Amino acid sequence: MKFKLRRILLLIILFILCGILVFLGIRVFSSDNSSDTFVSEKIKLNFESRVDKLESFDSGSLYKFGWLQIQGTNIDVPIFDSSSFAKVDTLDYSYGWISQNYNSGENRPVLMGHNILNVSSEPMLPNNDLENFEELMAFSYYGFAKDNLYIQYTVNGKDNIYLIYAAGFYDYTYDSAESMTDKNEISKYIKDVKKNSIYNYDVDVNSSDEIITIKTCTRYFGADSKQQFMIDARKVRDNEEIVKYQVTTNKNFDKLNLYKEKM
């Protein structure tokens, strides 16, 4: 009788241990897929105003359009208009340029910059050896993307904060980089880039928002596969709080090494 009781107790203990192991396995799997319970929190951005710097910046004969800063990177650069960007190779500092198809006052300016060094399938994270838009590739890592959510674009005498809502790879021929006015066109664009994003950003965005695109070239998928890497963001709305919002991985992009951390 005692032997039978011991067996029953042993089976109960084994059952409890198996339950604990299953629970821990589910927790690990959930953590790897960024599905842990998430609570947004207010954060303080460390962007500095670039209104005065843009005003006083000596760009020679180049037309100054704006100034771009991206959270978590050293991208803190003047933006020139594309009609003069051919001359900027003579400059010894980082820069970007705005699409020649952009018309002032329209929605979705497209800001572009060079990526000379950071073109492999395992991009380097921000460091002092990278310049221009090379550090944009840091957003291909989930560990970086989930912690860096905002950009600041200074234009027309005002610092504007934007929330990132999509990040993805595109064929080099994709998108003519045109600004937009038609709300149906804007809605379709937002839907397309969110669907193609390697992450799911918990950000509401619609055709009434002011949106912006930032992109650079990459060889992430091989030397013979010239592509673009793009992040899309929308302007912070009136009275909207600056918070750390949730970012999860998009299972459609399991071919990318999203979980590999280089932090």
Image (spheres, grey):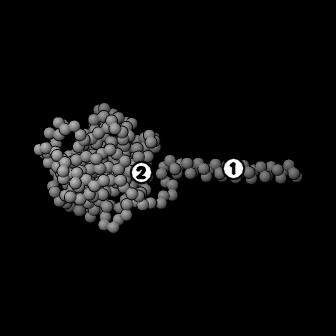
Q: Which circle marks residue 17 in the picture?
A: 1
User: In percent of the image, x 27 and y 35: which residue is there?
Assistant: 116
Residue 263, position in %: x, y? 44, 42
Please tell me whether residue 119 is drawn above or below residue 80 in the rendered image: above
- Dot 1: element: helix
Q: Mark 1 and mark 2 in contact (Cβ < 8 Å)?
A: no
Q: Is residue 254 left or right of residue 166?
A: right
Q: Is residue 217 left or right of residue 7?
A: left
Residue type of the residue flagged with mark 1: Leu
User: How many discs mark residues in the rendered view?
Assistant: 2
Q: Residues within 10 Å of mark 1 (few under 14, many from 20)?
A: few
Quadrant for residue 165, please give it.
bottom left
Which residue sits furthest bottom? 239
Determine if residue 56 is in view.
yes
First-in-chain label (2 vs 1): 1
Residue type of the residue flagged with mark 2: Asp
Q: Is residue 204 left or right of residue 18?
A: left
Q: Is residue 151 left or right of residue 40?
A: left
Residue 94, position in %: x, y? 25, 41
Q: Nearer the viewer, mark 2 or mark 1?
A: 2
Q: Compare residues 256 and 77 and report the one nearer the observer.
A: 77
User: In percent of the image, x 27 and y 58: which residue is there?
Assistant: 160
Determine if residue 194 is in view.
no
Residue 43, position in %: x, y? 41, 58
User: In percent of the image, x 23 and y 59: which residue is there?
Assistant: 158
User: In percent of the image, x 16 and y 45: which residue is there?
Assistant: 59
Residue labelled with disc 2: 147
Q: Compare residues 72 and 59 and report the one nearer the observer.
A: 59
